[in-house]
Amino acid sequence: MRLSVDTGGRTAVSYPSVAAVASGMEEGKEHMRGKQVLENADAVAIMAAAKAESLKNGWGVSIVVVDDGGLLLAAERLDGAAPITMRNACEKARTAALFRRPSKLFEDMAKEHPAFLSLELQIIAGGVPIFAQGECVGAVGVSGVTREGDVQVAEAGAAAIAG
């Protein structure tokens, strides 16, 4: 918000101070709401839980954690996982984060509506959104075994910070 003040033929422009804006004192403005975000410790916990689930089953997969904008926070390709699985896991996580829905949903929709295949989505199961206090804060993507196995590992990761 700019304030204009007439100073005898010249107009001076004044901006609110940083302190006033930060404290919500700017005229007509409400306080901004807080936003839940994944922190590094959360990404580490998600990765550890997903990796434990994968190793328990003897699966070599790639695991990726992204923030709510689909940007990478953590990634690991376990022994035995094919190189392409890392790219697939990234895209599954990105799809789940940006749409706030499991990537499997798009796989199911593409069966009835092939036009979904033209979108820049990874429409294969294995991307699971992560929610905190009702808000999507990111997603975990897994690739390397069956669709069901990828989802199982991703859900184990997401559950690490649920609550």
Image (tube, helix red, strand yellow):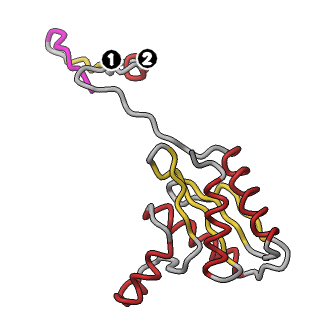
Splitting the image into 4 quarters, where does residue 8 fall?
A: top left
Residue beneath the point at 20% across and 20% down: 4
The percent position of residue 58, horizontal first and vertical second, equals: 82, 75
Image height of 75 relative to 8, above or below:
below
The segment highlighted magenta reads 1-8
Give left or right: position of 85 versus 99. right
Residue beneath the point at 56% across and 54% down: 67
Could you tell me how many numbered marks the image carries? 2
The percent position of residue 82, horizontal first and vertical second, equals: 77, 82
Image height of 69 relative to 146, above or below:
above
Residue beneath the point at 45% across and 48% down: 135
Query: Considering depth in this image, is 57 or 91 the residue closer to the camera?
Result: 57
Given the current orientation, which residue lies at the most extreme left position? 9
Q: Residues within 10 Å of mark 2 (few under 14, many from 20)?
A: few
Splitting the image into 4 quarters, where does residue 141 fall?
A: bottom right
In the image, residue 6 lies in the stretch drawn in magenta? yes
Q: Which residue is mark 1?
A: 25
Given the current orientation, which residue lies at the most extreme top position? 8
The percent position of residue 149, horizontal first and vertical second, equals: 67, 76
Whether label 2 touches label 1, CB < 8 Å: yes
Judging from the image, what secondary structure is the residue with disc 1 in?
Answer: loop
Image height of 3 relative to 110, above or below:
above
Foreground tag (2 vs 1): 1
Screen quadrant of the C terminus: top right
Q: CA distance from mark 2 to mark 1?
A: 8 Å
Looking at numbered disc 2 in the image, what kind of residue is underneath it?
Answer: Ala
The percent position of residue 80, horizontal first and vertical second, equals: 83, 79
Residue beneath the point at 64% across and 72% down: 89
Q: Which residue is mark 2?
A: 19
